[in-house]
Amino acid sequence: AQSVTQPDIHITVSEGASLELRCNYSYGATPYLFWYVQSPGQGLQLLLKYFSGDTLVQGIKGFEAEFKRSQSSFNLRKPSVHWSDAAEYFCAVGVSGGYNKLIFGAGTRLAVHP
Amino acid sequence: SAVISQKPSRDICQRGTSLTIQCQVDSQVTMMFWYRQQPGQSLTLIATANQGSEATYESGFVIDKFPISRPNLTFSTLTVSNMSPEDSSIYLCSATTGRENYGYTFGSGTRLTVV
């Protein structure tokens, strides 16, 4: 069955430090991969997505992610974190087979120290 | 990408009652979905809302508890029936055109508290 694993439940970084959030997926075919961010009390905002082509994907707010098929990973990175980046981050895989539903990982809560 | 209006944004309901949540998209979309996000948890797919036919439910979710309608390509409702405190969650609507760019849009969610 398709699944998404985000191994880090909580991550704390200092403002200005670099960030990498991990995401591993299990899916038999070429996946469609997404990163969403959810701020407290807010809805989901799409940061970036990968469908095909260049494996390094640029997103909004200075985020990027790299698709590595050999590692079944799609890690999210940012070179310098801002205090406003504190939020919950969700990795998701798009599942084909007629319904194109999204399967979400458990999420990583990011805290940013001043 | 499409914009979703979801209402109500929040509600407090008595146990044993039902609540219907509405999801309106500003353009025609192929697929609409309903998710549940329990407190401190990730999103779990409840069902895919199919236009003109019965919804497709995920394992652990049944039509009697979560009846769904989708009368046209831009509107869907989710009803949470015979509520108990365990149903207290955020319910989110999502939509996609299903085209190559695979844009999935989410509503802002309905925060439901059952007392």
Image: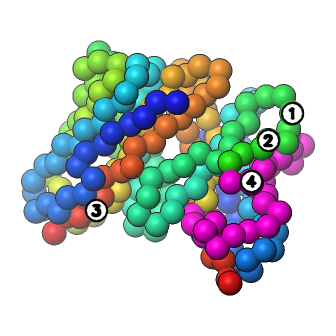
Q: Residue at x 41, y 30 (%)?
A: B32
* Chain ID of residue with mark 3: B
Rendered location of residue A105, percent (x, y): 60, 54
Image quadrant of residue A23?
A: bottom right
Q: Residue furthest top?
A: B52
Mark 3 lies on residue: B88
* Label 3 environment density (alpha carbons within 10 Å; few <14, some 14–19, many ≥20): many
Instruction: Identify the amino acid type marked 2.
Output: Val
> What segment is highlighted magenta in the picture?
A61-88
Membership of A34 in magenta stretch: no
Rendered location of residue A9, percent (x, y): 63, 70
In primary-sequence order, the first of circles 1 and 4 is: 1
Q: Is residue A67 visible?
A: no
Image quadrant of residue A59?
A: top right
Mark 4 lies on residue: A63
* Chain ID of residue with mark 2: A
Mark 1 lies on residue: A54
- Is the residue at mark 2 from the same chain as the one at mark 4? yes
Rounded to the nearest angstrom, the CA distance separating label 2 from label 1 is 7 Å
Rounded to the nearest angstrom, the CA distance separating label 2 from label 3 is 36 Å
* Label 2 environment density (alpha carbons within 10 Å; few <14, some 14–19, many ≥20): some
Contact flag, marks 2 and 1 (Cβ < 8 Å): yes
Q: Quadrant of the C terminus of chain A?
A: bottom right
* Label 4 environment density (alpha carbons within 10 Å; few <14, some 14–19, many ≥20): some
Task: Label 3, secondary structure: give it.
Answer: loop
Q: Quadrant of the N terminus of chain A?
A: top right
Whether B57 is drawn above or below B45: the answer is above
Q: Is residue B61 left or right of residue A43?
A: left
